[in-house]
Image (cartoon, rainbow, N blue to C red):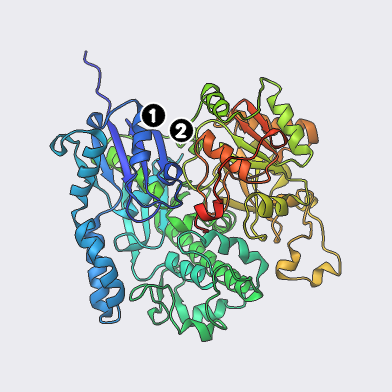
Amino acid sequence: MALQQSCWILGVSAFYHDSAACLVKNGEIVAAAQEERFTRKKHDSGFPANAITYCLREGRIAVKDLTHIVFYDKPLVKFERLLETYLGFAPRGLQSFVAAMPVWLKEKLLLKNLIKERFARLSGVEKSTLPPILFTEHHESHAASAFYPSPFETAAVLCVDGVGEWATTSAWLGEGNQLKPLWEIQFPHSLGLLYSAFTYFTGFKVNSGEYKVMGLAPYGRPKYVQKIYDHLIQLKPDGTFRLNMEYFNYCTGLTMTNGRFEPVFDGPPRKPESPLTQREMDLARSIQDVTEEVMLRLARTLYQETKAESLCLAGGVALNCVANGRILREGPYKGIWIQPAAGDAGGALGAALAAWHQFENKPRSVSSSDHMRGSYLGPSYSDEDIEGFLKTRNAPYVRLGEELFERVAAEMASEKVVGWFQGRMEFGPRALGGRSIIGDARSPKMQSVMNLKIKYRESFRPFAPSVLRERLADYFQMNVDSPYMLLVAPVVEKRCVGLTKEQQSLWGIDLLNVPKSDIPAITHVDYSARIQTVHEETNPRYHRLLKAFEAKTGYGVIVNTSFNVRGEPIVCTPEDAYRCFMRTEMDVLVLENCVLSKADQKPLEGDTDWKKEFELD
């Protein structure tokens, strides 16, 4: 009896933002990574040659062994949208049309040929010998990335982002191995672009700073909510909506908003890097409240239409973990699952899985195990790799055995900041204990130390807790898995600290340094936290560290933030981690079993200023 030949499918997202690659073997995810981690250029949109090379190396295959290459959207349909948008707004859209057309005509209309050329160059084979290239629709890729790895046999699927080809919001029903499209909202009416308009207006970078708006929101009042409803968005009871395009510039110009925004929202856009005022906090709170209301209504409508007891989410707006937390608490669903790489990078994964289940029509196995493998899908490095690198740098270190976890727990308990590098790198925007900077959640100074001396970023930015899954209910008002840090929940009341009479009169940023609980480093100003549950099955080493910290302190929760400085992608290699460690005021670096103390290190020779190396996000 002949052995069944393996089906290898490579998904690719590229040329817009957050390029990535994902390798799937017979429906199982083997590897996935974003191109930015290799090039060190945040949100890199180029052809993901490095990510593809890594995925093939992890699978121990060559390009010629692939059954399919799948691209995550359909460029011809996207070009149709660009043309129709120009014609619909002409002549106002001439500036953006002229800027976009040369790139489209030269490259993106001939994308299939371009992809073949890049793969041929990468693999050293003729274009004619490459595997077939397939194209999925953008929101189909999002929906597939959300449903197929989920633990649900049947689920409603909601995808919300800026824009794909035409869709900005789409609803699906996932059953078995099939995804059935139900309805969609089309460009230019986009919740993602509405949120990005406020990202721009509050002085942050579009497609990068949206999470800053979400983090700033609790410092504000919902002062502008009614103005948003009166002027910008017509929201129906079922959650569907239309935007008033008289206030936006993204169809016709090179900015998100136009001059009509300014009298409604009390002045011009904030200049990037200028001081934040209460107005920006109020704007952030207002658009966050509107976004949550839209998402809740859409989720409830989808439940009424499908009667599905579970919900899957993807698209860039699905990274809004505050809205996700409200859907979990206030929505009708028994279960909710969010793709950890919910943005365009996850489109590579969704495209590959869509080809396996829908094009190849292969069945889907459903189980309680994590099909995303904790999202630890990137490269890993052995102790031998690490020691070889450290010796080239003459960097003093010790290699520890079983005592490592107790040593690191003790360092954190003494308020040391630790760079933690182990196992496979995470796929998606969150550090989940593979490439993390960690510290003591009990420390009242940890948030400001990490923000200002380690990350070199805005002081208001909150940090997330990593908590032992079995201790979750001891700290947070939530009792479901949250392995990808995509759900926000309140801290349990017994841990919260009430405000004094004097503190009750404070508002906005003045509340930043007022302790809110006995784990102040991860408790946001509104007594909430963005939670990562740590599971022994998917990350036994990180779980063991938290157990050691609990044994030392009585607390099974620590601070976890991504291993990078502002504007830098999360570190990938031991060299990336060492450089970041040396450029910051981190105290300890753990590279697998190798431990480095900052006090023992010599300054980096010939190092450049990282602020000039990385464009601030």
Q: Residues within 10 Å of mark 1 (few under 14, many from 20)?
A: some
Q: How many marks?
A: 2
Q: Residue at x 37, y 51 (%)?
A: 142
Where residue 376 appears, as percent x and y from the top left, is 49, 35
- Residue 374 x, y percent position in the rendering: 51, 36
Residue 452 percent location from the top left of the image: 68, 55
Q: Residue furthest bottom?
A: 263
Q: For the N terminus, which image quadrant? A: top left
**Location of residue 233 (image quadrant):** bottom left
Task: Please state if 583 lies on the left or on the right of 129 as rendered.
Answer: right
Position of residue 79 relative to residue 594, above or below, is: below
Of the numbered discs in the image, which one, if any, rests on residue 58?
1
Q: Amino acid at mark 2?
A: Pro
The residue lying toward the viewer, choosing from 326 and 304, is 326
Left or right: residue 243 versus residue 581 is left
Figure quadrant of residue 116: top left
* Image location of residue 599, percent across then percent down: 72, 36
What is the secondary structure assignment of the residue under circle 1?
helix
The image's mark for residue 154 is none
In this view of the protein, which residue sits in the foreground, 324 or 24?
24
Q: Is residue 40 visible?
A: yes
Q: Which class describes the residues within 10 Å of circle 2: few (<14), some (14-19), or many (20+)? A: some
Q: Secondary structure at mark 2?
A: loop
Labels 1 and 2 touching (C-beta < 8 A): yes
Q: Which mark is residue 379?
A: 2
- The residue sitting at the left extreme is 128
**Earlier along the polypeptide chain: callout 1 or callout 2?**
1
What is the spatial separation of the Cα atoms under label 1 and label 2, in whole angstroms? 8 Å
Q: Could you tell me which residue is drawn at 77 percent across and 42 percent down?
A: 415
Question: Between residues 473 and 84, which one lies in front from this camera angle?
Answer: 84
When the figure is inspected, residue 265 is found, relative to residue 531, above or below; the finding is below
- Name the amino acid, label 1: Glu
